[in-house]
Image: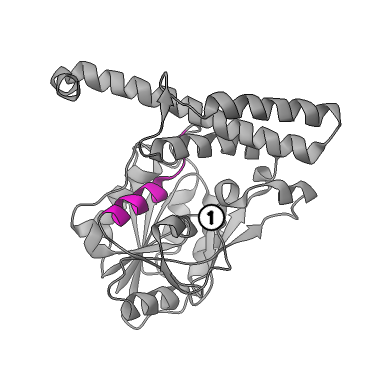
Amino acid sequence: MLSVLMATRNRARILRDVLESYCHLQRPPSGWKLVVVDNGSSDQTSQVIGSFANRLPLFSLWEPKPGKNDALNAGLSLVEGDLTLLTDDDVFPHVDWLLELREAADLQPSFSIFGGPILPRWEVSPPPWIRWVPTDPSFGVNDQWTQDGPLPASRLHNIMGPNMAIRTSIFQSGIRFDSSIGPCGSSYPMGSERELLLRLSDQGHKAWYVRGAVVEHLVRAEQMDEAWVLQRAIRFGRGIHRLSRNPKLWGGMPRHLFRDIPKEVFRMAVARLFFRREALFRAHWRFNFLRGMAVEARILARERRAQAQSCPEVLEKDS
């Protein structure tokens, strides 16, 4: 048996379409279970979930504490079976998704982590400038051309939150999602699933890519807006810095920012001067990415100071 786990918040309209697509999934012989955690929705989410109770092996849970990772951690109490599939409330799986991941997990017993392609599902026709956008961090779309097989640690980014599976025994051992990173409100560092995968990789768990396990991630009309994408770059930069290991700092800031930020400011100025829209957008995206790293560096510095004040013996030991 396997379980599918997702968190949802105030996306009743989209969730209805997603759950409808789940009704057409091919059932694995060992059975499956769907766990949906309502993360404090104030729209019609609960009614939507209830309307599928007789059509899906559906179990729901209410988690009022805001934050996707807190919701997922709460939902782990309801998962069953030896494999837990993680996805999002705006992701449409292909009909053989469960079968593909089930087969891969059965055929690769020495691997603990599995994932597959995430294709874009455009709500409206994308504008031409979308080709300038880094799709992985902006829209949760991964490299669909990766072949079946093991993924080294350097390629773990090919497994992403909308389409990943982890052996349930890992969660039964006490592993949980880190609530300090990932969706929570309107301002947060991205990368909660990446943080978990890096942690598991450090513990020796191996990842396997399943090319046939395909899902489609909805790209909503409002996301195809330059301001939205540029704001996303800040969140991505925050997450990358929070996940950085032993960064070289100067005054609490990554040293490379003192070189790279002025470089992007100069590029933006030149692009504006010569009306180069694509160059301006790309430079602005990189600038916001670096700006996000700077924001998170300040936040982490405050967290370290607060920790040192609450645990002075730790500070003395480190010094």
Circle 1 crowding by C-alpha within 10 Å: few under 14, some 14–19, many from 20: many
Give x and y (percent) for residue 139.
59, 50
Q: Is residue 162 above or below residue 227?
A: below
Residue at the (44%, 77%) spot, across then down: 100
199 in the magenta segment: yes
Residue at the (74%, 53%) spot, across then down: 126
Magenta span: helix, strand or loop, mainly? Answer: helix
Q: 293 or 6, which lies in front?
A: 293
Quarter holding the C terminus is top left
Q: 250 or 132, which lies in front?
A: 250
235 in the magenta segment: no
Residue at the (51%, 56%) spot, across then down: 15
**What residue does disc 1 label?**
90
Q: Under tag 1, what secondary structure?
A: loop
Quarter holding the N terminus is bottom left
For residue 265, which quarter of the picture?
A: top right
Give x and y (percent) for residue 84.
33, 64
Q: Is residue 35 above or below residue 311?
A: below
Q: 14 or 198, which lies in front?
A: 198
- Amino acid type indicated by mark 1: Asp
Residue at the (46%, 34%) spot, across then down: 188
**119 horizontally vs 213: left or right:** right
Q: Is residue 266 above or below residue 132?
A: above
**266 horizontally vs 43: left or right:** right
The total number of labels drawn is 1
Give the magenta-colored segment's residue range: 188-202
Q: 165 or 146, which lies in front?
A: 146
Q: How is the image coloured?
A: one colour
